[in-house]
Image: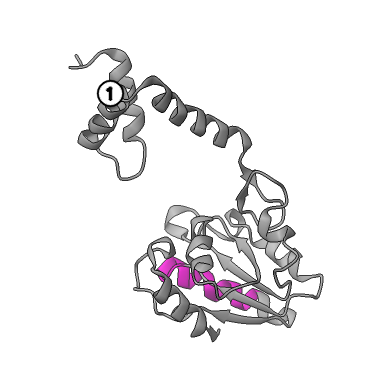
Amino acid sequence: MSDFAPSVSRLIDELKRLPGIGQKTAQRLAFFLLRSDRDQALGLADAIREAKDKIRECSVCNNITDTDPCQFCTSATRSRKTICVVEEPPNILAVEKTRQFSGLYHILGGALSPLQGIGPEQLKIKSLIERLKGGTVEEIIIATNPTAEGEATAVYLSKLIKPLGVRVTRIAMGIPVGSDLEYADEVTMMKAMEGRRDL
């Protein structure tokens, strides 16, 4: 039997599903929301509902967006000659914070991980190759996470793309091995972009 009313227990259980949220943090968040005024709590619920209803994947780069194509793909000021390949949408923010990259993006939706059943077919690699067929792309910057999976993905993409006559570079290892791009600070990410190398 739960110590809380059924609706409170359900709220705690739902909050525990969020990454990094355990039982105690879920309880603190639940009681914070219950102490908040009704408009504030419902504002959060409405924001979640609106995001779930309106956000979708860009049909070009697979970024999350509420307009299709996304703001990057439709921007007249971004270079069409360079595509930066990342694993997940939050990785774009790390690159954008540097203010050094003005090309386009491609989100793979993960990294190769045979142990988790993620092979090339589960990633958005075919659509990347399709984007290269137009002949305008001169360089692919592979900015996958500096993990074993990210490195394997980078090597796989390099072997796939190089025969197409497109330059393939990899961001430099200014980012600590084993971390995620979304946690990189601006200076580290900028140095990584500046020090990218051919694969």
Identify which residue is drawn at 43% across, 23% down: 39
- Image quarter where the C terminus lies is bottom right
Q: Is residue 168 above or below residue 39?
A: below
Which residue was labeled with disc 1?
Answer: 35
Is most of the magenta stretch helix, strand or loop? helix
Residue 57 part of the magenta segment: no
Q: Which residue is pictured at 49% across the width and 33% down the height?
A: 48
Q: Would you place residue 22 above or below residue 199 in this image?
A: above
The correct choice, above or below, for 173 with respect to 85 in the image is below
Q: Residues within 10 Å of mark 1 (few under 14, many from 20)?
A: few
**Is residue 152 on the magenta stretch?**
yes
Q: Amino acid at mark 1?
A: Arg
Q: Is residue 30 among what the camera can see? A: yes
The image quadrant of residue 71 is: bottom right
Instruction: Tell me residue 151's x, y (percent).
Output: 46, 73
Within the image, what quadrant is residue 3 found in? top left
Q: Quick one: 138 or 37, which is closer to the camera? A: 37
Instruction: Please give the count of numbered marks on the rendered protein.
Output: 1
Percent x, y of residue 95: 51, 68
Q: Which residues are magenta?
A: 145-160
